[in-house]
Amino acid sequence: MNAASIAALQRQSPLDALETRILLSHVTGLSRMQLITHDEQVLTPAQSETLQQLIRRRQQGEPIAYLTGQREFYGLMLRVTPDVLIPRPETELLVELALARLPAGGRVLDMGTGSGAIAVAIAHERPDAEVTALDVSPAALAVAAENAGRRMSPIRFIESDWYRALGEQPAQNEPQSFDVIVANPPYIVAGDTHLAQGDLRFEPVNALTDHGDGLSALRTIIAGAPAHLRAGGWLLMEHGYDQAAAVRELLELQGFREVRSWRDLAGIERVSGGHLHP
């Protein structure tokens, strides 16, 4: 591929056209439109070598988002690394539901924030809100903090194994109760064949599966939510395609009201939630 033009590289690439354009844009710094208007431009030897390396890695299955170090979510370009899950379009439903239930000046807790996608999207849309995000992984929190910094979003980040670091009693001037709690926890069942397929092979396994029945993290979040929700506050959680009924039952047993599930654009019950009695 040395000394080849952008047009020739697109014709010769073993990847599909979209992935080739994304990698070319990443390597050259050119926009999609510029790749068209500058298609006779020849890559430098260094750019050609970088492109070849990225193509080889992609052929081995490595996700495009990890190759480029970024992924768009809710209209925002976010930094991603192998330390965090790649934000997915279906998770935008969780953001929309949270925004619709967040009062003016409200407080939000994002549990297991990962890249910070949910927290950053909420903070960007609602600068009046107080957003707290926690994760057990220091590496994930570093990525999330970088994404918040890029958007100048004043999010409070906490290293915590679910609610543990929030404590039993509120610390002075540190809000411990929230109007909305959101979570996209590990929910894939241990041994699920999907864990060995596609992008999931490269993503942090502890962020994908609870190494059990897929519901243990959801149980922990639901059980601890009443102690950290204001009266009338909402708990909203993303879950697996076949877990909605089980999650609704867990919410109802914990005393949540108006329990229901919402479908994503594919028609799958993707998010379930409910609120505490005012």
Image (spheres, rainbow, N blue to C red):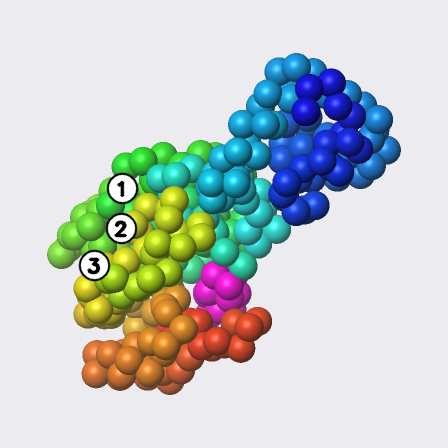
Give x and y (percent) for residue 166: 20, 51
Q: Are marks 3 and 1 in contact (CB under 8 Å)?
A: no
Going by the image, does 75 lie left or right of 239?
Answer: right
Going by the image, does 22 lie left or right of 252?
Answer: right
- Identify whether 22 is placed above or below 252: above
Query: What amino acid type is highlighted by mark number 2?
Result: Asn
- The residue carrying mark 2 is 206
Marks 1/2: CA distance? 10 Å
Disc nearest the viewer among 1 and 2: 2
What span is colored magenta in the figure?
Answer: 90-104
- The residue carrying mark 3 is 211
Q: Are marks 1 and 2 in contact (CB under 8 Å)?
A: yes
Taking the spot 42% from the left edge, 37% from the top edge, the residue there is: 81
Give x and y (percent) for residue 118: 45, 54
Q: Residues within 10 Å of mark 2 (few under 14, many from 20)?
A: some
Q: Residues within 10 Å of mark 3 (few under 14, many from 20)?
A: some
Q: Is residue 122 visible?
A: no
Give x and y (percent) for residue 200: 39, 52
- The residue carrying mark 1 is 137
- Identify whether 137 is placed above or below 221: above
Query: What amino acid type is highlighted by mark number 3?
Result: His
Residue at the top extreme, as displayed: 45
Query: What amino acid type is highlighted by mark number 1?
Result: Ser
